Image (tube, rainbow, N blue to C red):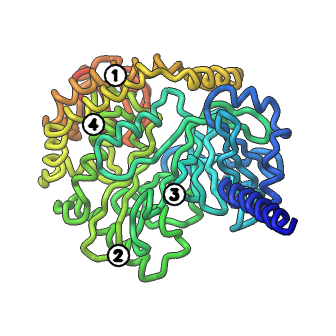
Amino acid sequence: MKRSFSILIIILLTFFCGLSASASSIGSATTESNENLLSTDDITDFDKYLDLGLPLLVITTDEGRDPTFELAVKPDPGCIGTGTTNAEKLPGTIRRFEPDGTLTYSSGTYENGVSGCTLKVRGNGSALRPKKPFKVKLQKKGDLLARGDERFNDKNWVLLTDVGMHISLGFTVASFFESGWVPAYEYVNVIINNQFRGLYILVEAIERNEKCRINVSKDGYIIENDCYWYAENGEYLPSVDLPKAAYTFKYPDFDELTPDSKAFIQSKIDQLEKSFTEGGYGKYLDLDSYAAWILCHDLLGTHDGLGANRFLVLADNHPDTKFTMGPVWDLDTSEGIVEGFFHMHYTPYISMAKMFLGEDKSLETVYTNLWINKGGKIYNQIVTEFKRLLKEGNHNFDISAEYSNEVWAPQNAAEIDPWESNIKRKLDYYAKKKIWLDQNVGQSLDVSVDEIEDDSFDADALVYSINGMLVGTYSDFLGSNAEKGIYIVRGKNKTRKIII
């Protein structure tokens, strides 16, 4: 009898230890709060959305509403573009369910620094669209992609809208350049406050994480050449080269900078910017990483010269350490330019134009050699991968896209095309883009600042402001009493800057 009782006690202890281990594996909440979150009774049509076949993220804010933000348009002191400011962070809970109903992650209920998450609207132009992108910040590190490896744990994640699969497969293209960390992503369906929000991509945020993201020491820096610095509450360093695009901080937090560390990073920025004009920039900027960043955007055909995120990474605080480029990020305009370089060849951000057009040809040489030596291999990898994706298909993506479109079409949001249509379009685009790059990489960029006669371009040539924003057609522009300044005209066979 005593022996049987002892065995029973051992069995019960083992069972309850197993429950405890299960609770700790799905999040950071207490056992009690995890038990409360195991129920899905609070989720309307839960099984219906699981049946779509993709992971399901369920986010509930404590106040049961979406976070708010404010619109900022050309604020003082001056800046370029339209953005957002005062983005509200709402505390709440996030759970991840696999298609079979298994709960693979739970943040637990919100407790500052302990469990739960915060949710806020992210982005600038993208935040103004009906379907909002979001940033999720966990209070305790975890892996929302549920890869089963603590190495991937982090607090910061983003949910992005991706109508043409430009962002997701743009990351795939970037990975073939083998020039550093590329964010991991996954297609997911999202419910927020018991409302189905449709198909998103869940993406690793740009963050210092020596194990799985950007590997910099604790004495290193991750900064952004940012045209939306006005929304950073003064937490930025100025740019002498381009005052309307100051430097904001991804790491460390601005308020963690000591006077010495602030003076150090400012001096590094000043050295780099001075070299744009004087030459010798290879002493301060890793040209291999920068050339790969430029060429990747050229291959992707992005056309956002103003808003393209430009992250600079300094691995440590050694005086001789060079800046390297962070990952390509702003990819929702991919495939926008088939016959042409992306707009930053003609705009002054990180002074690409100065480096290409100045006497120091180091960057142009590295860039040209990269395409000549590796462009064909990269293109073949793209074709191989996209043909594989086309052959496999993705029914779960397609049915999720249909449900997502039903939610957002009445709000005039762009619809998500089927998987096959997206992949076929991309294969056609990259075939044309490779031909154009083969013909034009290594040729002198004809972007000198010249006065141009009215008949130098066809009437339907497109005119852009110096910050990359479309102004109109060439004929309409010249007849509209345009303000004086420098503009970019993109014709069928040439692209030039003009002075008005």
Q: Which residue is mark 1?
A: 429
| Label 2 residue SS | loop
Q: Earlier in the sequence, mark 3 or mark 1?
A: 3
Marks 1 and 4 sit apart, C-alpha to C-alpha, by 27 Å
Q: Which residue is mark 4?
A: 497
In the rendered image, the quadrant that contains the N terminus is bottom right
Q: Earlier in the sequence, mark 4 or mark 3?
A: 3
Q: 228 and 13: which one is in front?
A: 13
In the depicted structure, whether residue 153 falls above or below residue 386: below
Q: Which residue is mark 2?
A: 317
Marks 2 and 1 sit apart, C-alpha to C-alpha, by 42 Å
State yes or no: discs 3 and 2 in contact (Cβ < 8 Å): no
* Relative image position of residue 422 (x, y in whole percent): 45, 21
| Label 3 residue SS | helix
* Relative image position of residue 349 (x, y in whole percent): 35, 50
Q: Is residue 70 visible?
A: yes
Q: Which residue is mark 3?
A: 229
Q: Residue, x 46% and y 62% (percent of image)?
A: 208
